Amino acid sequence: MKADAKTEAAVMATLNKSFEAYATRDMDGILALLVPEPDVVAIGTGADEKCIGLGEARKAYERDFAQIEVTSWQLGSHLISVAGSAAWVTADVSVNAKVAGREMSFPMRYTAVLVQHDDRWLFAQQHTSLPAAVQSEGESLR
């Protein structure tokens, strides 16, 4: 189910556009990469960041832009798989941000589901998470 080179390049183009639109605070660019369906999902790292629909996603991105001064995302190791008109991504992402004047860098986990929509790959679901700080390497839940 690993994506062929052409599909992987197309999905990567959508990922890169998404990361660039976020870094430049291009709300129209971000929303244009989401499927225009009421069940599009974006889940962030915050306990309340579960957004269903374009309206909720817009509000979450607006909140991010109000609170985060500078952000860049660098894609690390990743895997892109495909079945028919659906593709999914699993990746490690390194994030650099400036919040309340404080610069920070941290690793994130990123997953996404994309679907072909009018010959483009668009996000149906995105999810970011932070590794659990209370869980040491080699440990399961404690």
Image (cartoon, rainbow, N blue to C red):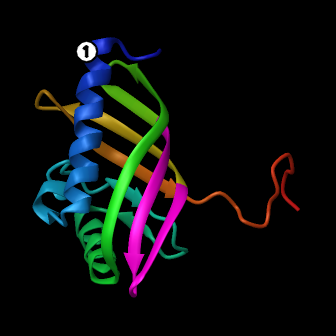
Q: What stretch is highlighted in magenta?
A: 90-107
Relative to 112, say whether 29 is above or below. Answer: below
Magenta segment: does it hold 42?
no
Q: Main secondary structure of the magenta part?
A: strand
Q: Which residue is drawn at 41% across and 42% down?
A: 75
Please name the residue shown 25% across and 76% down the image.
62
- Quarter-of-image position of residue 107: bottom right
Q: Which residue is drawn at 38% across and 66% down?
A: 51
**Amino acid identity at mark 1:** Lys
Residue that protrudes farthest toward the top in the picture? 4
The C terminus sits in image quarter = bottom right
- Of residues 67 and 35, the one nearer the viewer is 67
Quick check: 140 left or right of 60?
right
Residue nearest the viewer, comparing 139 with 96: 96
Query: Would you name the residue on which mark 1 appears?
Result: 6
Above or below, 108 against 124 in this view is: below
Q: Where is residue 98 in the image (x, y as percent from the top left)?
A: 38, 75
Percent from the top left, x then y, of residue 7?
A: 28, 19
- SS at mark 1 in the image: helix
Characterize the local packing of mark 1: few (<14), some (14-19) or many (20 or more) Cα atoms within 10 angstroms: few
Left or right for 134, reference 22: right
| Residue located at (47% from left, 39% from top) | 76
Please say whether residue 28 is visible from this viewpoint.
yes
* 97 inside magenta stretch: yes
Q: Is residue 111 above or below residue 49?
A: above
Q: Position of residue 43 (x, y in %)?
A: 45, 60
